[in-house]
Image (cartoon, grey):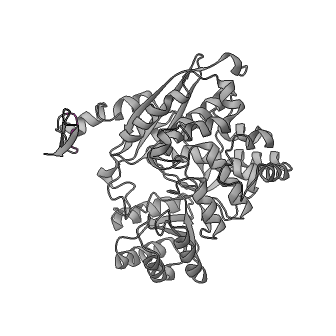
Amino acid sequence: MAHLTYNASRIRGLSVRDIRFPTSLQCDGSDAIHPDPDYSCAYVIIYTDTDFKGHGISFTIGRGTELVVAAVKSLAHLVVGKNLKDIYDDFAATWRTLTSESQMRWVGPEKGVIHLAVAAIVNALWDLRARTQHKPLWKLLVDMEPEELVSCIDFRYIGDVLTKEEAVEMLKEMIPGKENREERMLSRGYPAYTTAAGWLGYSNEKIEGLLKQFMSQGWRHFKLKVGQDLEDDKRRCQFVRELIGEERTLMVDANQKWDVDQAVSWMTELSPYKPLWIEEPTSPDDVLGHAEIAKALKPLGIGVASGEMFQNRVIFKQMLQAGAIDYCQIDSCRLGGVNEVLAVYLMAKKFNVPVCPHAGGVGLCEMVQHLQIWDYICVSGTTKGRLIEYVDHLSEHFKTPSKITSCHYIAPKVPGYSTEMWEKTLQSYEYPYGSQWKELFKEGKYRDPRTCPPPWVEHREAGDITQR
């Protein structure tokens, strides 16, 4: 099949939908900060004047998804009507346009709801690009010449740490052996760990059953949520350590729960259970706090892993500069899509910090496999000290879900970014009018926003809003 000719193609439209799953009913995804997440996403489809479409996702956890959807709609005019050639010939400029819209930037910039919206659009653009080239995204990235790939990155704010020239040289140094590394990803795959048994809301019985199931399948790396109650954490860590044995790896995740001193003292108490890392010990904006925690925990053999909630490449830059993280956890949606993620991988390479992506949410496993496989083939050249998070929740809603064999992600072969969802899923779980949500409202398991009046009254003449 011939490749799409960009010169003759343009984006004719963009749709965005609020897709939510009622995962809080089973405590799936629960942690010390987010006890009742409903895994969700803003789901973007980019339409061209051909048969090609691009599918993009930005992960959310329920309420607030409507804000991301609104932000996507406000940014859509920046890509709709554009020629694909103009977008992809200078992708860094396209990315900067999306992150620098003069009025929308004020409610960012490059962070929060706006950046999540940018991610959804940018991820859809990369999915579209990979589809038009008939390649999975990782292969598209691998086959790019170093100069072409680096041209996709906006180096503003990070040039003091990484220049374009340095980035190109990094990639050129890794060209030897690329074919062998690519074959390894296609045959053996990338090592993974699972969080699926470690949610904070799970009972001991459920944790034990899941751990035994995973161990029977060969899993050797497990993550456990902590941070709500110290004595309970000690009990749960001991319980899990005794189940998995000393030879398997345990990681723990506090999801930003603690102050700096509290993180150090809490993890000192948990150190006898030999966790490899503590993930998100404190505020994701506290660079110096992370550095202090990392320094204090190093003698205990505990690393600091973080990045799931880092706002942008600038925070990653500072964390790496300060030696504040031992494991760099990029998120495919928190950052502004693939372009910005590439920059973080290259900075992590310069600072010799392994990247272990955050995954597990709606579509995250599907996306990060592409990024980490590209990193192995073109940037790091190793899987040592590196793992991809894996949770199988909701994978059945994707047309090409991630494939796990012997606890390894196997490199996908289907063109695109693995982000396309089934139309039946979209119709069933679009909030609040999907058939599954209507049934949940009818059963009284969720408040129906279609019939419940809002808690405020808008006085249009006065122009103010008052509480009922």
In the rendered image, the vertical position of residue 266 relative to residue 413, given as above or below:
below
Q: In this view, does 286 lie above or below 361?
A: below
Q: Nearer the viewer, residue 32 or 425?
A: 32
Residue 233 percent across, percent down from the top left: 39, 75
- For the N terminus, the image quarter is top right
Q: Is residue 445 left or right of residue 365?
A: left
On the rendered image, what quadrant is the C terminus found in?
A: top left
Say above or below: 350 vs 288.
above
Quadrant of the rendered image containing residue 412 = top right
Occupied quadrant, residue 67: top left
* Principal secondary structure, stretch drawn in magenta: loop
Left or right: 304 as drawn, with respect to 93: left
Where is residue 297? Give x, y as percent. Answer: 56, 79
- Residue 192 visible within the image: no
As drawn, which residue projects farthest toward the front? 462
Count of numbered tags: 0
Determine the residue positioned at 68% across, 26% down. Answer: 86
State which region is magenta: 446-450
Tell me if residue 442 comes above or below residue 4 in the rendering: below
| Residue 416 can be seen in this image | yes
Q: Is 76 covered by the magenta stretch? A: no
